[in-house]
Image (cartoon, grey):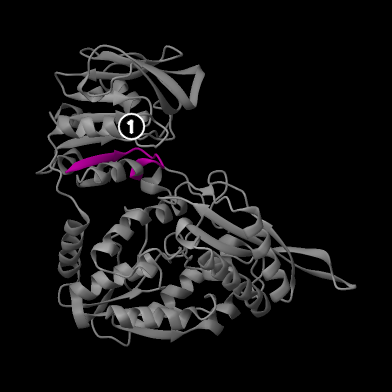
Amino acid sequence: MIRIIDCGSQLTQNIARRIREFNVYSEILPYSTPVDEVLCDGLEGLIISGGQFSIHDRGAPIYDEAILEAGVPVLGICYGQQSIAHLLGGRVQSTSDREYGKTRIHLSGHSPLFEDISFQALDVWMSHADIVTYIPDGFEVIARSVNGHIAAMQDLNKNIYSVQFHPEVDHTQYGRQILDNYLSICNARRDWTAESFIDTTIKRIQDTVGGGVAIAGVSGGIDSTTLAVLMQRALGDRFCGIVVDNGLLRKDEGVEIRKSLDALGVNYAFVDASQRFINMLKGVTDPDEKRKRIGHKFIKVFEEEARKHKKVKYLGQGTLYPDVIESVPLYGVSSTIKRHHNVGGLPEKMALDLIEPFRDMFKDEVRAVAEKLGMPREIVWRHPFPGPGLAVRIIGEVTPEKLSLLRDADEIFMQELKSRDLYYDIGQAFVVLSSGMSVGVMGDGGTYQNVAALRAVTTKDFMTSDIFRFEWDDLQEMTNRIINEVKGINRVVYDTTQKPPGTIEWE
């Protein structure tokens, strides 16, 4: 395997994902992991991630220097390069010539890291204010930026390589080639596949649960449904999916979820807790508070349902990496963006232990697993739906009246996307009911009604996204349908915000 020492970058899992794309198994460890736990049997290479800190900051993540002396091929990225230089006797300093975003570098000399790259100048993605100004003994510079900064260095004797840029992002030219070359340096086994993940995950679930019983929250989305199928295969009758109608689902969604699970042969229980959730949200306008309350209520419902089954000690969740990195500081050093109801919203004490096999994965990776499991296309490529449901697509207080408006508008939007064969070209699409009201005119009378926003994005990993560019006539026709058919909405706008700076969901 390849192990990644996480120093706090929100791109750490991008590294793991790129490695897995080459069919090499990868794991992420916090920088504080003891060296004897890092250097396990089967370890083929170590990658030191980037991070938001300066090496000189108080509390900066510093891993054990001994891992650099273990003889395992090492690749440092961004902060990883700076930390390697610092620990091995080099010098790192801040610079006024900071490099963020697209930057050109020039390769020099020969390095196996740049094998099969014929160009001597590459456009790469930088994000740093510190630079290596003096390399450690035994190292040589193998690339510099247009500002003259050390962009890459190596020590062939120690098998240590580092780059100041981010090869794991799509914006870096030959980024995948650089990572592929590193895996060749490691002589890494390339046998990790969706099939092997399925086999390994089923065995891990069986080993974890033992002779006990597990439940899982199933929303009908790709993540939780794939989890339910895996747990069903692993545990059989000792597994039960819990479908909670929280009153925040889309139109007729509860019925559709049950049909899907029946077709997939998944054991499940259906719990109607809609009134409990809606009552709990009365008067709540803060989005973080919404997510927190919904997360706590979900767990309470799960625990109540678990008492109906003997020996239940485990709760499965379809948590993905973007949920984790946006919700809680990963390993105590990365930044928090927002709270996901099943991550940052969890109570501190739970009666159930968690099983989260997708916690280090992106949605497209889960979809690959789902396809190997033989799940139907309409589930595999179903647009994501947030755990808190329509509560975070209504800006401000959630009321039954607003939920009704939003359900009707969202159903029209989905119908229009599917009738135009656009649904599967879009990563995620939905309607938001804003907190604003708008003056309008219908017939000969004035109106003062709600404003709805359409949101449609393209993305692979949901860490970043671009807007979907509709044909103007299509957008106009969808707008007209919503205004004409949904009484209470008199204005529709289209959200053209990318991620970043925005998130995909509004709340």
Residue positioned 20% across, 41% down in the render: 2
Q: In the rendered view, would you say 166 is above or below 117? A: below
Task: Please give the range of residues in magenta.
Answer: 1-13
Q: Is residue 311 magenta?
A: no
From the top left corner, tell me how far across and down residue 109 is, in percent: 25, 11
Q: Nearer the viewer, residue 190 or 426?
A: 426
Q: Amino acid at mark 1?
A: Gly
From the top left corner, tell me how far across and down residue 92 is, in percent: 38, 18
Q: What residue would you read off at disc 1?
A: 175
Q: In the rendered view, would you say 488 is above or below 504? A: below
Residue positioned 48% across, 65% down in the render: 386
From the top left corner, tell me how far across and down residue 194 is, in percent: 22, 56
Q: Is residue 339 left or right of residue 108?
A: right
Task: Report which quarter residue 30 is drawn in.
Answer: top left
> Can I make out residue 433 in this image?
no
Seen from this angle, which residue lies furthest left?
A: 41
